[in-house]
Amino acid sequence: MAHAVAEEEPQAHMGLPLPHGKLAMWLFLVTEIMFFTGMIGTYIILRNGMPTSNDPWPTPHDVHLVEFIGAFNTFVLICSSLTIVLAHLALHHGNTKRAVQYIGVTLALGCVFLVVKAYEYNAKFAHEILPSRVFEKLDGPFGAEYVRHVEEQLNHIIEGHGHASSEAKAACEELLKDLPSLSPFQVNERIVGTKNVKGVDRVNLKGTDEKPVKGILEEFKAEDLHLSYSIPFGNMWASTYFAMTGFHALHVFGGLVVFVIILIMALRGRFGPQHTHLVEYTGLYWHFVDIVWIFLFPLLYLV
Amino acid sequence: MTNEPEAHAEAGPNFNTYIFIFGVLVVCTLLSFLVNYVLGQNHTSATIILLIAVIKAVGVAMIFMHLKFEWSKLYFLIIPVMILGVMMMVVLLPDIVLDWHLGGE
C-alpha cells in the first residue's frame, strides 16, 4: 500500500527552462562577479578610506596613466561586444560566413586591447611604478634608499642612456653635485618641483629664505626622464592596479583563445549553425569581461 | 531543465537594437570622459561618471547578454550575488578603513 502511494506522488524534476550550457555559464559568471567584486571593492575602500588631503591617493598623472588610452580601450571592448553579439545573431539566422567574419573582428579587437594594455604596462615598468618599487614615506629608512636610487638614475641620464638633451643633463649634473647636502624631501622637490610635492612630502619653507623650485621633470616634461619621485600610496595603487587589470587581461586572453578555437573549427569546415550556443555562451563571457572594464576604466582613469 | 536548445528558441533583440545599444555605450563613454575633463576630479564628477558606468553595464547585461528576456529564469542567481557583493565591501570597510584611522591616532 505504501508502495502504491509513493508511485502516485509527482516525480521531482529540475524545472529551470534553460539549456544546461547557459545555466553553467551563468553559474560561472556569478563566481566571476564575486571574484572581481572582491578586488574592485577592496580598491574602492582603499582609495576612499585611507588617503587624506595631505597624504592623497595618486592621480592618473602621478602614475603615468593617460585617460585617453583608457577611453580608447573602452571603445575597443564595446566594439568587440557588438561584433560577438552580431556573430551570434548571424549564426542564429544560419549565416555561418558572416558569423565567422564577426568572430575574426572580435579576435582582432581583443588583440588590440591587449596590445594597448601592454604599451601601458611598459610605461609602468619603465618608470618603476610597480608594487614595492615606488618610493613613499621619505622620512623613514626609505629616504636614504631613495636618495641612493636617484643618484643611480642621475648618473644613468648623464652617461647618455636616456636620450636626454644637454640642458637636461646639465640640470641632472647640478642635482647630482648638490645631492650629498640635500634631504630626501629636498631631492624629491628638486625632481618634481615645489608645486607638485604632496603635503606629506612638503619641505617647510616657512621661516626660511628658500624659494619654490621648478623640478627637473617639470622643466623637461617632453623628454620623459626616468627619475623616481615620491608617490604617497603608490605601492598600494600599483598592487591594486596590476591585480585588477592583470586578472582582467587574463580573462580577455582566455576569451581570445576560445575565438581562435572557433576560427580553427571554421577553417576546417566544422563550424556551423549547430554551434549557435557555443557562440552565445562565449559571448556571455565576453560581455562580462566588457562589463568589468566598464567599471575599471572610470575607477582607475577618471574618478 | 529542458534538453538543450529547442525549448529556448529566443525572442531576442534584432540588429537595430544592438546597434542602438552600441551607440548608447559609445556616447556614454564619451560623456564620462567629458565630465572628467570639464569638472575635474571631485565627488560630483565621480558620482556622475559611476552612474554612467552603471547605465552602460545595465545596457550590456540587459540587451547584449539577453537578461531583459531571461530575467525570470536567472534572477535567483543575479540578485543574491549582488547582495553578497555589497556585503563583502561592507565587511571589508571596518577591517581596512577603521583599523587604519584608529591606528593612526
Image (cartoon, coloured by chain):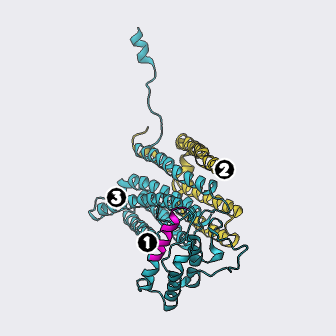
Would you say residue A247 sits in the magenta stretch? no
Q: Residue at x 43, y 72 (%)?
A: A122
Image coordinates of residue B62 in percent, x first then y, are 56, 53
Do the residues bearing badges 2 and 3 touch, measured as CB atoms within 8 Å? no
- The tag on residue A134 is none
- Any mark on residue A122, and which? 1
Of the two numbered discs 1 and 2 in the rendering, the one whose residue sits closer to the viewer: 2
Mark 1 in CB contact with mark 2 (< 8 angstroms): no
Q: Nearer the viewer, mark 3 or mark 1?
A: 1
Q: Residue A199, position in %: x, y?
A: 66, 66
Which residue is outermost to the bottom? A166
Magenta segment, which residues?
A: A140-151
Question: What is the x, y in percent for residue A191?
Answer: 56, 77
Residue depicted at 50% across the width and 68% down the height: A144
Q: List the residue tagged with mark 3.
A: A272
Q: Earlier in the sequence, mark 3 or mark 1?
A: 1
Amino acid of disc 3: Gly
Q: Residues within 10 Å of mark 1 (few under 14, many from 20)?
A: few
- What shade has chain A been given? cyan
The colour with which the image depicts chain B is yellow
Q: Which residue is mark 2?
A: B105
**CA distance separating discs 2 and 3:** 66 Å
